[in-house]
Image (tube, helix red, strand yellow):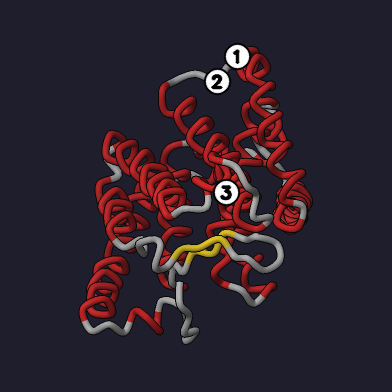
Amino acid sequence: MNIPIWQYVLTMGGYFVLLMFIVEYMRKHYRFANWFWTASLLTFPIWLMGGVVGWFRWAKILSVIIPTIFMGSVRIAKYEKREGKIWNSLRKDWALWVLYGVLFLNIMEATIKDFTMGNIFNALCGFLLCVTIPFPPKYWKISEEKYGDLIAYTTIGWNFLYTTWNACFVYAEGPKYFASSLCILMAAEIYPIIKKRPELYITARVYTLATHLLLRACFPLLFPTLMDASAWHNDVFMKYWGIVNFAIMVPYLFWHMWQLHTNKAEISFRRGRVENI
């Protein structure tokens, strides 16, 4: 599909702004967010009519929306200090480990897919991203201040590597969705910068990805029609992009391990913020 440049500018710019608004609104209106994502599961029949096929696509949608609902419930339990057996349980550390595990599995899903597509170096980068996710509860928490945010002290380097790794994966796996996926990745990167709170990266990533997958499931022709990026695809570029990602990932891995080994991670992962978590 031959799409003029001005259409990319308008559609990608508009989608980026929409995603930024959605992250901000769902962060501040955590009850609405929880109800919204719970209700989103009722659109399941539309997914069938829209032609969602393949194990990866189904696994991807459900492995993002269900944990988004879980994250919302944990936010409510912690911030509002809800009482009751279930609410009390959601305030415990196991809930943070579940969220960590979801992030780990989300990356591994795409990493396995990368391997099957022959995008080996990018897949290796994805595997090392899993290895370098900071552990909860030391570097994860639900804030007791406004608005009960999920705080995850991933580093700026890890956030960047996740973004370029995931962009390369989408470039290989679904070229026609690359432009729209680039919007959700950039929104997750830029939102924490604007808020001057880099620890909100995972929160922004959760809401942008959940929004994108829900829209794709319900309106399968929306993004291919508005911003089909199939013409941008080049196998040679994809290969070298993966190699560059892996080349950057290797020194980051050593830096990450050195921070943990020397106990400098207490400061570097939190960007100088000394806290008891």
Q: Is residue 207 above or below residue 85?
A: below
The quadrant of the image that shows the C terminus is bottom left
Circle 3 is placed at which residue position? Answer: 74
**Do the numbered discs 1 and 2 sit on residues whose CB atoms are within 8 Å?**
yes
Give the structural element (helix, strand or loop) at label 1. helix
Q: Is residue 121 above or below residue 161?
A: above
40 vs 238, left or right, is right
Image location (x, y in percent) of residue 206: 57, 49
Mark number, residue 48: 1
Image location (x, y in percent) of residue 153: 46, 69
In terms of depth relative to the viewer, which is nearer, 7 or 135? Answer: 135
Residue at x 57%, y 36% (from the top left corner): 65
Task: Give the spatial CA distance, label 1 vs label 2.
Answer: 6 Å
20 vs 84, left or right, is right
- Identified by mark 1, the residue type is Leu
Circle 2 is placed at which residue position? Answer: 52
Whether residue 76 is visible here, answered yes or no, is: yes
Residue at x 33%, y 43% (from the top left corner): 108
